[in-house]
Amino acid sequence: MSPVIKPKKEKFTLPSKYLLFILTIICCVLMVLTFTSDIFNKPLNYVVGYIIVPYQRGISSIGGYISDKKDALVNVYDLINENQQLREKIEQLEDENTQLLQDKYELNTLRDLYELDNTYENYEKIGASVIYRDSGNWFSTFIIDKGYRSGITPDMNVICGNGLVGKISVVGPNWSKVTSIISDNSNVSSTVLKSQNNIIVSGSLEEMKNGVILFSQLIDDEDKVSEGDKVVTSDISDKYLPGILIGYISTVNPDPNNLTKSGTLIPAVDFEHIEDVLIITQLKQYVDEEEINNGYNSLTFSEDLLNEDDATEESTDTP
Amino acid sequence: MKRFIITVFLLITLFILQGTLFRALSFADTVPNLLIIFTVSVSLMRGDTAGMLVGFFCGLLLDIFTGPTIGLYALIYMYIGYFNGGFNKIFFPEDIKLPMIMVIVSDILYGFFVYILLFLLRGRTEFSYYFTKVIFPESIYTIIVTVIIYPLLLFINKLLEKDEMRKARKFVS
């Protein structure tokens, strides 16, 4: 029955060992390339954005519909729709409101302690909704439904309510990936608002299940930092705009080296139930390390030149 | 061709379900790994080459959307597909025990590799914690979902095989 088919099939089979070998090399090359550059991001993100995101959006809305049904047995579609819109509005208003309240509180109690340039309610923001959560159990990233078409670029800060969610790490035409601050590979330089101590807030898979994140590198000899203190992003952070609320300190423990302290803090955002987020379109001003070095170099260079000039002048003077 | 289109469709559907619907149905913050089920099923039904390719594209999709670097998950899933392809010879469609064992073994292997490559290398050494809180619950949930999804995949494969047989016969006669 198969004299016609068999040779055809044999023609098509490349020995799987070779294929495995080739694909392994491709994977390794891809990994190295993505570590060193981002040439693959543009085309891949573009293709994927067109094939998968519309589908994803559809299923995500079905998922949202199902979970809505699960939550309450109201199945009036219009009600849900209206509710969604109102909720978005409430979210924004709440954000503004908490912002105002926070400002008031801060102005009243901390005005003479420091002058925090708390401008983050003045930043331009774009709303977006979450359409996909990290499919594994290892990291905490998610996909939102706005991309570079809406003016989003990598490293923009993402907030929800009045707390920091994370930053944009990858951008496609109509989607982008947000790496949250509770993800295991995330570190944020931040400040304890009360005592102005700089700390490092890092996500941790171990602590994520307890609803807290870790902080470390706190230098606090006088025990000024205590439970419930506000933690905001610091001025010296590379990627995050200053003064965005991260959370509240929950525990403080001295490190074994007796110099620094570490502990846990409770994030201000409920990461379990993120649906809509706001993206701040303003980027943190960033100076390249190379630029700094170059600046320094040219300075020393000109100083050298000056010295040389002096030297030549002296030498011309002496004879 | 038909098989190719259906495989691509299934791959994308499972990938999306994993991040949307199953996120909503997660128990104790754990999401089942549907793509492992798919990769293992395909390699058991179709052999190592097909399993390897499906694993590669599953991983690539994960890499683009959620992975820390492109190529890492692709590598892990590809090897899982290749590894399972070896059991193609002792596979019988009616027997659900082998796929279930292979899914749980593969999922634990997958967790193990992810832990080593992405966590141990960054100095997170508490393996027992990650095993009991992430790898083990994930594989248990995955195995429960396998019971539902595997018969479905088997059914689709049977239909496709029937279709291919019919076409082949037509071609010969």
Image: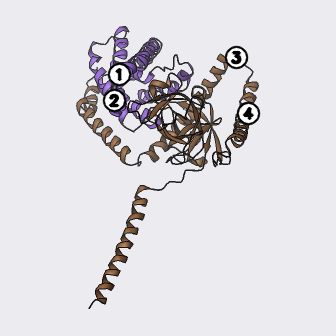
Chain colours: A brown, B purple
Q: Specify the subunit that label 3 lies on.
A: A
Cα separation between marks 3 and 4: 20 Å
Cα separation between marks 4 and 1: 43 Å
Cα separation between marks 2 and 4: 43 Å
x 29%, y 17%: residue: B88
**The quadrant where residue A316 appears:** bottom left
Label 4, on which residue? A90
What secondary structure is found at the residue carrying circle 3?
A: loop
In the depicted structure, whether residue A39 falls above or below residue A306: above
Whichever of labels 3 and 4 marks the residue nearer the N terminus, that label is 3
Counting from the top left corner in percent of width and height, residue A210 is at 51, 22
Is disc 3 in contact with disc 4, using a CB cutoff of under 8 Å? no
Whether residue B110 sits left or right of residue B144 in the image: it is: left
Q: Specify the subunit that label 1 lies on.
A: B
Q: Residues within 10 Å of mark 3 (few under 14, many from 20)?
A: few
Q: Specify the subunit that label 4 lies on.
A: A
Whichever of labels 1 and 2 marks the residue nearer the N terminus, that label is 2
- Furthest toward the front, the residue is A222
Q: Nearer the viewer, residue B162 or A226?
A: A226
Which is in the foreground here, disc 3 or disc 4?
4
What secondary structure is found at the residue carrying circle 2?
A: helix
Is disc 3 in contact with disc 1, using a CB cutoff of under 8 Å? no
Counting from the top left corner in percent of width and height, residue A306 is at 37, 77
In this rendering, does residue B169 appear at all? no
Label 2, on which residue? B120
Is disc 1 in contact with disc 2, using a CB cutoff of under 8 Å? yes
Image quarter in which the C terminus of chain B is found? top left
Whether residue B118 sits left or right of residue A46 in the image: it is: left
Q: Residues within 10 Å of mark 1 (few under 14, many from 20)?
A: some
Which amino acid type is shown beneath numbered disc 1? Phe
